[in-house]
Image (cartoon, grey):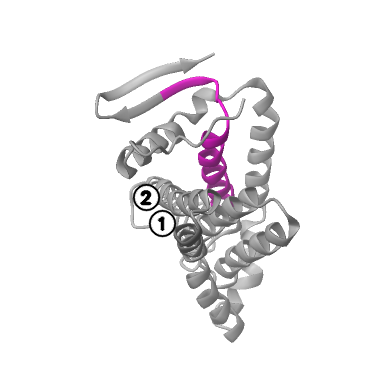
Amino acid sequence: MALPSPVRADTNIVTQTLQDGAFLATSPLRLHKEDIPVGIGVLAILGGGFAVDRLTRRNLFLHENDPAAKDLRQYGDVAQFSGLIFGAGFAVHSLATDDQKSKETAWLAAESLGWATGIGGVAKVVVGRERPSMTDDPFQFKMFSSNVSFPSGHTTAAFAAADVFSEQYPTWKVIAPAYVAATAVGFSRLYANQHWVSDVVAGALLGTAVSHTLRKRRHQVDKGWHFTAGPQGIQISRQF
């Protein structure tokens, strides 16, 4: 059964953002048996990334200072903020026309970017993976170090935006360019020798998962445990 957006007039942005963060954190508690194939697929894709890390680095290492690599890197540095850039456009449109879908799209774009990059940033520090520009060994990890290769932050942000716009406007006129642009961001990080393939794959999976989960929260009842934060404190409930 579909529900209206949980963003209500009496719920401020801080409270809503905290509630969404709690929803993301407890998402594993809402997994069902039918989610197992998806989980296996995700692990297989990520494993495939690790399998070709060394080979890809060997072939791209010599090109990291090529003009094309520099141009792609500049593109990636800008395109990672596509969620905010286009989200701002949707925000302006919603203010001018009172269009609720544009308002929701703008909110999702900004929040997805915030939570996805936040989660990715924590993962970077915890994992402590060394960048390919510093080593030819893709399995150099030192937890809680200055090594912050895994996952790719640029790719995380780009795919979070691509998923938001693609799910909000599910037409190939939106889906194709959104994901082509996001994939180009990921490739730019490989070509510039700033990330391993598995870093980029992990970033794409993380960005997509976060934005999909946040949008799902707004459009359907989700069975399982729920943790919400509000003026009355933290509340725990379960939907059956």
Question: How many marks on residues?
Answer: 2
Q: Amino acid at mark 1?
A: Val
For image coordinates 39% across by 57% down, the residue present is 147
Q: Which residues are magenta?
A: 201-226
Q: Position of residue 61 (x, y in %)?
A: 59, 73
Image quadrant where one finds the C terminus: top right
Question: Residue at left 49%, top 60%?
Answer: 87
**Cα distance in 3D space between marks 1 and 2:** 6 Å
The residue nearer to you, when weighing 156 against 67, is 156
Residue 21 drawn in magenta = no
Image quarter hosting the N terminus: top right
* Residue 125: image tag: 2
> Which residue is at the front of the view, 33 or 9?
9
Q: Earlier in the sequence, mark 1 or mark 2?
A: 2
Q: Which residue is mark 1?
A: 148
Disc 2 residue type? Val
Q: Which residue in the rendered view is the most extreme toward the front? A: 97
- The correct choice, above or below, for 135 with respect to 18 in the image is below
145 vs 168, left or right, is: left
Q: Residues within 10 Å of mark 1 (few under 14, many from 20)?
A: many
Residue 88 lies, with reference to residue 123, above or below; the image says below
Q: State whether residue 176 is above or below residue 67.
A: above
